[in-house]
Image (spheres, grey):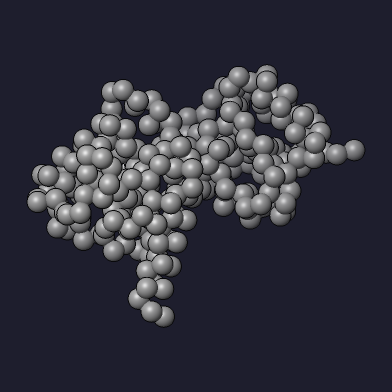
């Protein structure tokens, strides 16, 4: 296999890892070395790191670790939420130890794959911190739930997903209805309408800190007319009983 083909395969792995880990709508920094293909991340805003004031690839590396950390802090303050370090760029963490220390202190490693990339969530603090925390929790939930459901549910079976991370769960070509957990009553009505249209499963997604709405209101609403087929830490799966 040629070097170019190996590199293209690695780019594909990086993009797949980001799609499985980072919620849609997020702003993602990628160490690209100027390769625009690494920024094609589906419904996510991919940006170069480092970058020029206009958002283009900077065209050079930071002079030292302090400059690398400062540049990342500027972009994080401006709204960047994640940093992707492809396998071929891991030398940054050795060459700029201050950057690694900053990520350890102010970020969180969400995914690490020797054949793809390391993905960090960036904590911004202050303005927008609630959104960042919510996005981080969704990013934790979605990949695990997606893997569970792809293994558990039949192909092309319709699925209703309710709760944090519903938008980020990947279910291949299964028809999906994705609903927020609040407000409760409209979501229950929409879920039942989806079941009437042919959805076969209803999935309640649980964050680490479970909500009264999911535990105390959704479960009774669905348990009376559906069969609970799976209960895991992050999700409960009900099967619709079609008469």
Q: Residue at x 37, y 31 (%)?
A: 132
In the picture provided, is 104 more to the left or to the right than 9?
Answer: left
Task: Name the residue nearer the viewer: 219 or 32.
Answer: 32
Q: Is residue 68 above or below residue 38?
A: above
In the picture provided, is 212 more to the left or to the right than 187?
Answer: left
Would you identify the image quadrant in which residue 87 lies? bottom left
Q: Position of residue 30 (x, y in %)?
A: 32, 50
Q: Position of residue 119 (x, y in %)?
A: 35, 50
Would you identify the image quadrant in which residue 29 lies? top left
Task: Name the residue nearer the viewer: 58 or 171.
Answer: 58
User: Farthest residue in the bottom direction?
Assistant: 1
In the picture provided, is 143 more to the left or to the right than 31?
Answer: right
The answer to whether residue 131 of the structure is visible from this angle is: yes
Q: Position of residue 235 (x, y in %)?
A: 59, 39
Q: Residue at x 28, y 53 (%)?
A: 31
| Number of callouts | 0
Q: Is residue 235 above or below residue 33?
A: above
Would you identify the image quadrant in which residue 89 lies? bottom left
Q: Residue at x 21, y 35 (%)?
A: 74
Q: Residue at x 28, y 31 (%)?
A: 78
Which quarter of the figure is the C terminus placed in? top right
Task: Name the residue nearer the viewer: 105 or 50.
Answer: 50
User: Farthest residue in the right direction?
Assistant: 243
Task: Name the residue nearer the viewer: 1 or 153.
Answer: 1
Q: Position of residue 96 (x, y in %)?
A: 14, 53
In the picture provided, is 239 more to the left or to the right than 62?
Answer: right
Which quarter of the figure is the N terminus placed in? bottom left
The answer to whether residue 49 of the structure is visible from this angle is: no
Q: Is residue 101 above or below residue 38?
A: above
């Amino acid at each position: 296999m040629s070097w170019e083909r190996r590199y293209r395969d690695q780019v594909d792995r990086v993009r797949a890892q980001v799609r499985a880990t980072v919620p849609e709508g997020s702003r993602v920094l990628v160490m690209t070395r100027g390769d625009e293909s690494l920024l094609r991340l589906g419904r996510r805003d991919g940006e170069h790191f480092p970058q020029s004031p206009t958002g283009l690839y900077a065209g050079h590396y930071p002079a030292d670790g302090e400059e690398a950390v400062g540049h990342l802090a500027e972009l994080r303050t401006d709204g960047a939420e994640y940093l992707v370090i492809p396998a071929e760029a891991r030398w940054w963490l050795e060459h700029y130890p201050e950057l690694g220390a900053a990520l350890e202190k102010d970020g969180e490693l969400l995914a690490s794959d020797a054949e793809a990339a390391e993905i960090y969530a960036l904590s911004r603090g202050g303005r927008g911190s609630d959104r960042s925390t919510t996005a981080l929790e969704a990013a934790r939930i979605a990949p695990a739930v997606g893997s569970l459901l792809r293994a558990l549910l039949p192909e092309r079976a319709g699925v209703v997903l309710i709760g944090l991370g519903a938008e980020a769960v990947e279910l291949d070509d299964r028809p999906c209805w994705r609903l927020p957990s609040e407000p409760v009553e409209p979501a229950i009505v929409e879920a039942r309408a989806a079941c009437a249209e042919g959805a076969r499963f209803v999935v309640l997604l649980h964050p680490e800190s479970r909500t009264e709405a999911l535990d105390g209101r959704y479960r009774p609403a669905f348990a009376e007319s559906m069969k609970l087929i799976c209960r895991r830490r992050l999700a409960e799966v009900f099967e619709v009983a079609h008469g």
